[in-house]
């Protein structure tokens, strides 16, 4: 399995505002001059951005990359893609055709960029952990709680004992009984939801496998994850109508679908049997 190298520009864009000053300057230069940057050494990038070669290497480490070569390969992959539409803000008084066009574009963009950030090895590891789990627990607050409930509905089809909680008090009662053979998946777009971080921390302390689904970059929820999975939706934040977590929801649902499909395809015959039994019962209920 060979992972296509793309997503370098997305990573830089997602992380830029949270980077130290010198690394932020390098990220800004690369985003403004990607074609030039892919031909530079670390020393040259440092000089062009007014920083240093050491700062360039620290940036690569902040992006969780193996080094400058991987970053340049990812950016090269980005530059070879067809030009995609960017996120588009919805303004007051928009016409209906503009609303349909912009919302559709933004949702598709969230899925595309999330796909570019997928860590194939991490997703494979997460799928294996779910298959081996005695119980599977999902937790999220607010809009992320809806994603947790959607995930529960999916994984129940695989005959996996699955729970989903959106209230921290109920989640604490659930986590109090969690075992080392269990898996907890904490969902938080920002990665800074206090309740989700608390639940993740406690599950990890009790030895359960912890998986996070958050926006790309360093954050509290991901810090408690054995397997962090990332989505992209950063451009949604400044929009004047970030109502109901629109684009972030699409990224989260996409990641859940990827994980579920990985589990199904790994045990396709078993999954087919479960689905047939469910379909048979549903037919008799009609």
Image (spheres, helix red, strand yellow):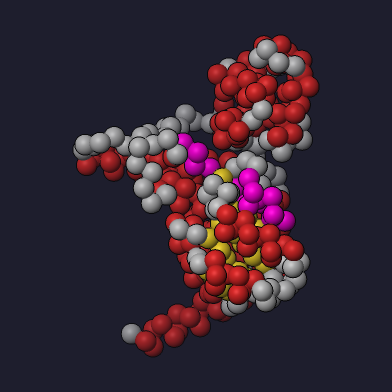
Taking 72 as reference, is 66 left or right? right
Judge from the rendering whether residue 218 lies leftward or rightward of residue 248; answer left or right: right
Left or right: residue 169 versus residue 47 is: left
Q: Residue at x 45, y 39 (%)?
A: 237
| Nearer to me, 245 or 200 | 200
Magenta stretch: give its range. 219-235
Q: How many marks?
A: 0
The percent coordinates of residue 42 (x first, y second) are: 75, 19
Q: Is residue 225 magenta?
A: yes
Quadrant in the picture for residue 114: top right
Which quadrant of the structure image shows residue 28? Answer: top right
Of all residues shown, which one is farthest toward the bottom? 284
Front residue (pair 85, 103): 103
Picture residue at 54% right of the left edge, 47% below the top: 190
- Residue pictured at 63% horizontal, 45% vertical: 219
Residue 235 in percent (x, y) is at 46, 36
118 is higher (above) or lower (below) than 210:
above
**Residue in the picture at 32% in, 37% down:** 90
Up/down of 273 relative to 186, above or below = below
Q: Any magenta on residue 256?
A: no
Q: Is residue 118 visible?
A: no
Q: x, y (%) of residue 93? A: 21, 36
Does residue 49 appear anywhere in the picture?
yes
Location of residue 157 with respect to 49 vertically, above or below: below
x and y percentages locating residue 286 in the rendered image: 33, 85
């Amino acid at each position: 399995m060979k992972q296509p190298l793309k997503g370098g520009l997305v990573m830089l864009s997602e992380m830029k505002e949270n980077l130290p000053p010198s690394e932020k300057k390098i990220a800004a230069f690369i985003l403004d001059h990607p074609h030039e940057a892919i031909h530079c050494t670390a020393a040259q990038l440092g000089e062009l951005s007014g920083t240093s070669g050491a700062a360039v290497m620290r940036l690569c480490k902040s992006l969780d990359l193996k080094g400058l070569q991987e970053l340049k390969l990812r950016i090269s992959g980005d530059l070879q893609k067809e030009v995609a539409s960017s996120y588009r803000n919805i303004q007051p008084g928009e016409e209906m055709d503009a609303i349909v066009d912009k919302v559709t574009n933004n949702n598709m963009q969230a899925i595309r960029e999330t796909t570019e950030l997928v860590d194939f090895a991490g997703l494979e590891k997460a799928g294996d952990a779910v298959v081996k789990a005695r119980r599977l627990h999902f937790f999220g607050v607010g809009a992320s709680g809806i994603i947790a409930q959607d995930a529960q509905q999916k994984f129940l089809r695989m005959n996996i004992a699955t729970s989903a909680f959106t209230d921290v008090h109920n989640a604490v009662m659930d986590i109090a009984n969690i075992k080392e053979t269990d898996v907890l998946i904490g969902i938080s777009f920002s990665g800074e939801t206090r309740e989700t971080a608390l639940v993740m921390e406690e599950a990890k302390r009790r030895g359960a496998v912890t998986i996070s689904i958050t926006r790309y970059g360093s954050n509290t929820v991901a810090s408690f994850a054995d397997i962090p999975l990332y989505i992209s939706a950063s451009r949604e934040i400044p929009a004047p109508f970030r109502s109901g977590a629109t684009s972030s929801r699409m990224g989260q649902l996409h990641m859940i679908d990827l994980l579920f499909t990985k589990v199904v395809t790994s045990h396709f015959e078993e999954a087919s049997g479960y689905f047939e039994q469910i379909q048979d019962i549903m037919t008799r209920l009609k």
